[in-house]
Amino acid sequence: MTPRENMIDIVGIAEGFISNFNENNGENLLFYGTTGLGKTFLCNCMAKSLLDKNKIVIYQTAFTILEIIERHRFGKDGKDNNDYQYKLLFEADLLIIDDLGTEVANTFTNAEIFNIVNTRIIAGKKTIISTNLTPKEISETYTDRVFSRILDKFIPLKFYGHDLRWE
């Protein structure tokens, strides 16, 4: 399949995801592939479509999500905004985690990524993960629990082709 044909398939799946968003089908998406192939662009398009339907969408990089979690867990500023941002990670209709794998991977980040993904799955909340990591690299970077949840509960969609930023 050419990169263009692959992208047409992926866009069709994304459109189906948006059309069937209100169904309790446990559908989550994993976008993976090298840089410059349209993963972030497609995430933005999907977020806009759902925002236009009055859905609550949180779109953050994995690094920023972990900063929100750290401020919530360890912050001493006592701001209610930290609690609100933290709760939205679990309660938003859609959480888009962009650039998974760019954050520092350690026991804390592994536990928190698992907590967010697992809690959202149990609650029937939808999640999209975008990463430059291959499934093999995800398994090497994160714990078996995280990898198992992603492998089992997400539809993996591989983006491939030439970096569109250079075209």
Image (cartoon, rainbow, N blue to C red):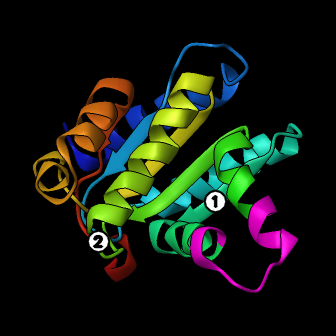
Query: Judging from the image, what secondary structure is the residue with disc 2 in?
Result: loop
| Residue type of the residue flagged with mark 1 | Tyr
In the figure, 80 relative to 124: above or below?
below
Residue 62 in the image: state x and y as whole percent: 46, 66
At 62% across and 25% down in the image, what residue appears?
A: 123
The region drawn magenta spans 72-84
Q: Which mark is residue 59?
A: 1
- Pick the front one: 117 or 33: 117
Q: Is residue 78 magenta?
A: yes
In the figure, 155 relative to 83: above or below?
above
At 29% across and 24% down in the image, what residue appears?
A: 152
Residue 82 in the image: state x and y as whole percent: 75, 70
| Residue 73 relative to residue 147: left or right | right
Asked which quadrant contains residue 16, the reply is: top right
Q: Inspect this view and state whether residue 12 appears.
A: no
At 24% across and 41% down in the image, what residue appears?
A: 147
Residue 20 in the image: state x and y as whole percent: 66, 19
Labels 1, 2: front one: 1
Asked which quadrant contains residue 18, the reply is: top right
- Pick the front one: 62 or 53: 62
Residue 119 in the image: state x and y as whole percent: 54, 35
Q: Label 1 to label 2, Cα distance in Å?
A: 23 Å
